[in-house]
């Protein structure tokens, strides 16, 4: 395809996404709950050529196609979305990769992030609540002032063991980050992780750190990442 310049028609982009779809990639992604077959490196290359195009991003999102939505998240302007629009988008983002990119690439950059964090964390939808916990983990690491870390550990201790998978993953990440970043809470975080055993048997590739909180905390502190 020729280099993309200027405003591009939606059907042109959708055609290129269709051409990039690979059955083997789709098969691999399906194992992780994602329903698209576009190599992410090629998707990022397309986004780089398109550059930022908010209108196109919105139209791509509305297609409900997973690859199109991932591309939308790469070419949008995060700070232009209204609070209610982001709330609607996170409820529409049902595949793991779209959910992850939406939270990390868009919501975290939004001026509405803190308001949404508070609203989402207690949402009855576990996918939405997971987004809230992801935002809380970001604050634990980068801006903990004003957070009740002991209170967060109380909730994690009471609810993480039986939480739905996506929510459980985010709560576990928060537990680990508290233990890594805040030495005064490290012993309790380690204890909670050991007792609940969440993700203790999670398959981990050689050279990667286990997401099991006690292992994760200990390794990151050993590397000097803790405080």
Image (spheres, grey):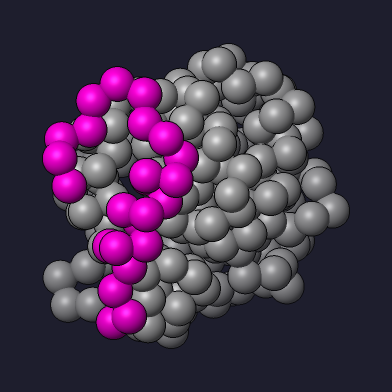
Using the image as rendered, state which of residue 81 and residue 151 is in the foreground. Answer: 81
Say above or below: 145 vs 175. Answer: above
Number of marks in picture = 0
32 sits left or right of 217 in the view:
right
Left or right of 27: which side holds 155? right
Q: Quadrant of the C terminus?
A: top left
Residue 90: x, y in percent?
66, 44
Name which quarter of the figure residue 111 lies in: top right
Q: Residue furthest right?
A: 124
* Residue closer to the observer: 23 or 15: 15
The answer to whether residue 194 is seen in the rendering is: no
Image position of 166 with respect to 63: above or below:
below
Q: Residue at x 37, y 37 (%)?
A: 74
**13 versus 26 height, above or below:** above
110 is within the stretch colored magenta: no
Picture quarter containing residue 37? bottom left
Residue in the picture at 60% in, 53% down:
64
The picture places residue 11, in percent across and down from the top left corner, at 44, 45
Magenta stretch encompasses residue 14: yes
Q: Position of residue 139 (x, y in %)?
A: 52, 30
Which span of residues is magenta-colored?
Answer: 1-25
> From where the camera sits, is residue 200 visible?
yes
Q: Position of residue 16 (x, y in %)?
A: 31, 53
Horizontal placement of 71 versus 122: left or right?
A: left
Q: Is residue 179 above or below residue 20?
A: above
Which residue is pictured at 47% across the width and 31% down the height? 56
Residue sitting nearer the eye, 188 or 92: 92
Residue visible at 78% across and 33% down?
119
């Amino acid at each position: 395809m020729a280099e993309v310049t200027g405003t591009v028609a939606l059907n042109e982009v959708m055609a290129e996404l269709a051409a990039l779809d690979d059955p083997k990639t789709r098969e691999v992604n399906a194992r992780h709950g994602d329903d698209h077959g576009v190599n992410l490196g090629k998707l990022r290359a397309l986004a780089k050529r398109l550059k930022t195009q908010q209108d196109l991003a919105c139209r791509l999102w509305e297609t409900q196609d997973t690859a199109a939505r991932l591309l939308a998240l790469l070419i949008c302007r995060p700070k232009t979305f209204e609070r209610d629009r982001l709330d609607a988008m996170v409820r529409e983002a049902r595949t793991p990769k779209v959910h992850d990119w939406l939270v990390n690439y868009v919501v975290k950059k939004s001026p509405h992030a803190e308001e949404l964090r508070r609203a989402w964390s207690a949402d009855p939808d576990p996918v939405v609540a997971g987004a809230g916990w992801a935002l809380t983990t970001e604050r634990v690491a980068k801006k903990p002032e004003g957070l009740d870390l002991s209170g967060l550990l109380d909730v994690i201790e009471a609810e993480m063991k039986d939480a739905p998978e996506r929510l459980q993953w985010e709560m576990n990440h928060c537990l680990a980050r508290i233990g890594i970043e805040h030495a005064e809470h490290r012993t309790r975080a380690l204890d909670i992780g050991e007792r609940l055993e969440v993700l203790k048997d999670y398959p981990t590739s050689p050279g990667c750190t286990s997401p099991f909180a006690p292992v994760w905390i200990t390794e990151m502190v050993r590397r000097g990442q803790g405080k």
